[in-house]
Amino acid sequence: MINSRPITYIYDDPSEPSPLTPAHFLIVLESLEETLFAISKIYDICPPSKVTCQFKVDDVVLIHDNRFPRNLWSMGKIIETYTGRDGKIRSCLVKTKNNAIRRPVQLLYNLEV
């Protein structure tokens, strides 16, 4: 009974929406718990694969630059890759139209050409 007491104003006109009660929040909470449980079961059955882009020499990339909008980022061609101690590629030397710059792979976007 306590969860059915109205929190908001009760309207005289029947065409107005029903008043908000604590029960409305409980219903949403139960639905959210069920959804999160279903998602966790799906991840247990089929975990998401970690798809990583492996850069290699002669790949054409878009170089991230915070100073400009995305349509003005420069393009370049990878001329050398540098690996970390774990053996993964961590940065690349990229040849642009003006010079060669070394950038971390987090700032490079592989273009499929």
Image (cartoon, rainbow, N blue to C red):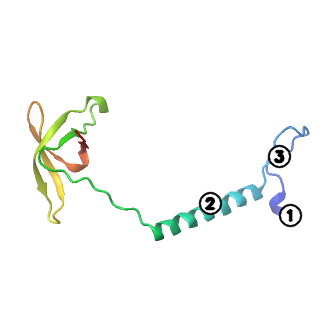
The CA distance from mark 1 to mark 3 is 16 Å
Are there few (<14), some (14-19), or many (20+) residues within 10 Å of tag 2? Answer: few
Q: Look at the image and tell me in which quarter the C terminus lies.
A: top left
Q: Nearer the viewer, residue 54 or 96?
A: 54
| Mark closer to the observer (3, 2) | 2
- Considering only order in the chain, which callout, 3 or 1, is on the residue closer to the N terminus? 1
| Mark closer to the observer (2, 1) | 2
The CA distance from mark 3 to mark 2 is 22 Å
Q: Which residue is mark 1?
A: 1
Q: Is residue 85 left or right of residue 24?
A: left
Q: Tell me where residue 111 sits by quadrant.
A: top left
- Considering only order in the chain, which callout, 2 or 3, is on the residue closer to the N terminus? 3
Q: Are marks 2 and 1 in contact (CB under 8 Å)?
A: no
Q: Secondary structure at mark 1?
A: loop
Position in image of residue 105 (x %, y %) = 21, 49
The CA distance from mark 2 to mark 1 is 23 Å
Circle on res. 32 = 2
Q: Are marks 3 and 2 in contact (CB under 8 Å)?
A: no
Residue pictured at 56% horizontal, 63% vertical: 36
Find the residue positioned furthest to the top: 72
Q: Look at the image and tell me in which quarter the N terminus lies.
A: bottom right
Q: Tell me where residue 96 sits by quadrant.
A: top left
Residue pictured at 59% horizontal, 61% vertical: 35
Position in image of residue 65 (x %, y %) = 25, 37
Q: Is residue 73 left or right of residue 4?
A: left
Q: Amino acid at mark 3?
A: Ser
Position in image of residue 99 (x %, y %) = 8, 34
Circle on res. 18 = 3
Q: Is residue 12 left or right of residue 86?
A: right
Q: Quick check: 23 above or below 10?
A: below
Q: Secondary structure at mark 2?
A: helix
